Amino acid sequence: ETGVTQSPTHLIKTRGQQVTLRCSSQSGHNTVSWYQQALGQGPQFIFQYYREEENGRGNFPPRFSGLQFPNYSSELNVNALELDDSALYLCASSSGTSGSWYNEQFFGPGTRLTVL
Amino acid sequence: ILNVEQSPQSLHVQEGDSTNFTCSFPSSNFYALHWYRWETAKSPEALFVMTLNGDEKKKGRISATLNTKEGYSYLYIKGSQPEDSATYLCAFMDSSYKLIFGSGTRLLVRP
């Protein structure tokens, strides 16, 4: 059973650029969540995808968007990067079904994004 | 705005000491409470998922309790070891199924 993987590990972009982060879910998991972790804070929920549909969103602007693919891998896209977008981005997969959304989440190692 | 508070922010203990942390969360619309351990340079790892008031869970030397009516959970580590050094995160899930994380308690266990 392979774990959750993320790519790239590190990324440096400049303000105004666009970025795509990738996540490969753990085998058999149909739900993926994305989080942003700024220094000194806990992870903040960006959004969740279940079977390729957005299933919940946190307080992030529309320039944060996502996709989940039929093989349950996922992308996080951020347009018009701002300096405050510098953070660690984590994805987490879980096996969700109606009535069992509380299942533990399996996290990837994260992508460290620096916006200059 | 949902708020999850963890205390203390950081803790330094001696090997062999027992310790505990607190997680406070909203007492309404409770769905689940998660605890994660996050070691440096690794991924967060689930310790417990708790859903019922009065739940007590145990994994080795680590245990957790849950009080949903008053909105708190305690995590206990008995006989701390240096390998327990990590950040311990709790996360509250309400009926919207979003996980709201606290800022974590950073534990350092000195040999």
Image: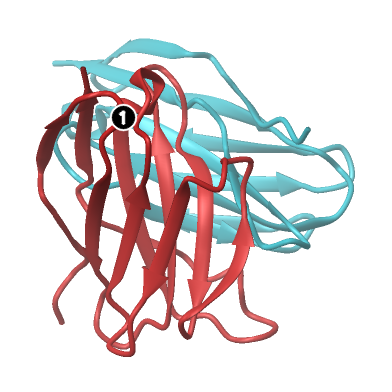
Chain colours: A red, B cyan
Q: Going 36% across and 45% down the picture, which residue do you hit? A: A78
* B95 vs A11, nearest the viewer: A11
Task: Please name the amino acid that badge 1 sits on.
Answer: Gly
- Percent x, y for residue A31? 45, 75
- Percent x, y for residue B2? 75, 36
Determine crowd level at label 1: few under 14, some 14-19, many 20+ residues with C-alpha closer than 10 A: some
Q: Is residue B42 left or right of residue A62?
A: left
Q: Can you identify the residue that label 1 sits on?
A: A16
Q: Secondary structure at mark 1?
A: loop
Q: Is residue A8 visible?
A: yes
Residue B23 falls in which quadrant of the image? top right
Is the C terminus of chain A in the top left, top right, bottom left or bottom right quadrant?
Answer: top left
Q: Going 75% across and 63% down the picture, which residue do you hit? A: B52
- Percent x, y for residue A27? 24, 84
* Location of residue B94 with respect to A48 vertically, above or below: above
Q: Going 53% across and 80% down the picture, which residue do you hit? A: A96
* Location of residue B31 with respect to B14 vertically, above or below: below
- Percent x, y for residue A19? 25, 45
